[in-house]
Amino acid sequence: MTSPPARVRAAFESDVRAIALDRVLPTRQVTASMRANRKFRQIAASIREIGLIEPLVVARHDGDAFLLLDGHVRREVLMAMGAADGPCLVATDDEAFTYNKRISRLATVQEHRMILKAIERGVPEERIARALDVDIDRIRERRKLLDGIAPEVADLLKDRQCPMETFRILKKMKPLRQIEVAELMVAMNTFSSTYAKALLAATPKSQLVDASKPAAAKALSPEQTARMEAEMERLQREIRSVETSYGPDHLNLVIARGYVASLLRNKEVSRHLERHHPEILAEFRRIAKDASIGSEVDESEA
């Protein structure tokens, strides 16, 4: 007869509480340089415009005090605004880690869609700009982010951190070329504008929206441009080929390394190799060592 499963302890108390800010003890200092950076100003502007969205995370301390686990900037902004208390989520454990360590940053395409949705619901662009502490022209630019971008490209880059300049460069290409470039950027996990410019330079004029404008730098001759285009096409084919075989190849390599390591744990096999094939034994030991290092790294990241 199996025993009943143990109950999972909740990490937080069920209700968000309003707690006096002078009872919330910070665990690190908000420095002058932190107050001067852009992120601080954006958080302050957002709280002033639409209020505090994410509550402070605290843990119970001595007496009626609480330790602040997450939300030092939010607490600082609230106190600067003269607030006496703030909404707090009370953790059941005093966890000694940063809550933002595994934070998922908002992707560029997702930010664009959020701005569109806010505008559709009647929020003025000026208010969005104030809430994000940016110029209104930047909001308008982000609103038009996907104008001229193929839907397939928007889907490929929907969860990626892409600079605005990368999208500007993509708009200079025709849809099919945009898709090729986006697939290449995803395969290489590189979305910088510099990389996008290099791919633009290697794009044939027939695949540009405005073929009258040269894609390559003026210093490149037509022959050099043609060679670069051919080399880029070859590289794209090789990357696609590697993509299809990488998973099975990696799995086979892991299995092979594990098998070699298990062979070396057999004393009879090790003695035989040491007597008759010392060079193979040395190579096997190197492979087994690499395998053990890889497993240690995987465990540390888990």
Image: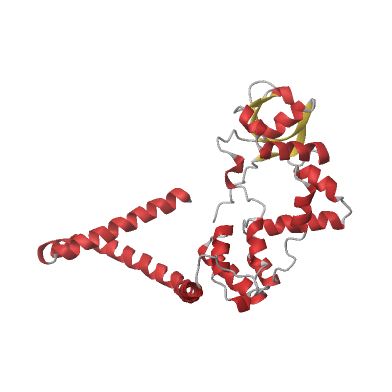
Residue 269 in the figure: left or right of residue 247? left
Residue at 58 percent across and 39 percent down: it is 98
Residue 54 in the figure: left or right of residue 216? right
Outermost residue toward the bottom in this view: 206
Residue 116 in the figure: left or right of residue 72? right
Outermost residue toward the top in this view: 63
Residue at 29 percent across and 55 percent down: it is 289
Q: Can you see residue 58?
A: no
Give the quadrant of residue 200.
Answer: bottom right
Give the answer, above or below, for where 264 lies relative to 77: below
Q: Can you see residue 126?
A: yes
Give the quadrant of residue 206.
Answer: bottom right
Depth check: 228 or 283 in front?
Answer: 228
Give coordinates of residue 199: x percent, y percent: 55, 67
Residue 184 in the figure: left or right of residue 48? left
Residue at 33 percent across and 68 percent down: it is 256
Give the answer, above or below, for where 115 lies relative to 202: above
Residue at 67 percent across and 74 percent down: it is 175
**Picture colour scheme:** secondary structure
Depth check: 133 or 157 in front?
Answer: 133
Outermost residue toward the left in this view: 275
Give coordinates of residue 254: x percent, y percent: 37, 65
Outermost residue toward the right in this view: 122
Give the quadrant of residue 49.
Answer: top right
Give coordinates of residue 204: x percent, y percent: 57, 76
Count of number-bearing discs: 0
Q: Quadrant of the N terminus?
A: bottom right
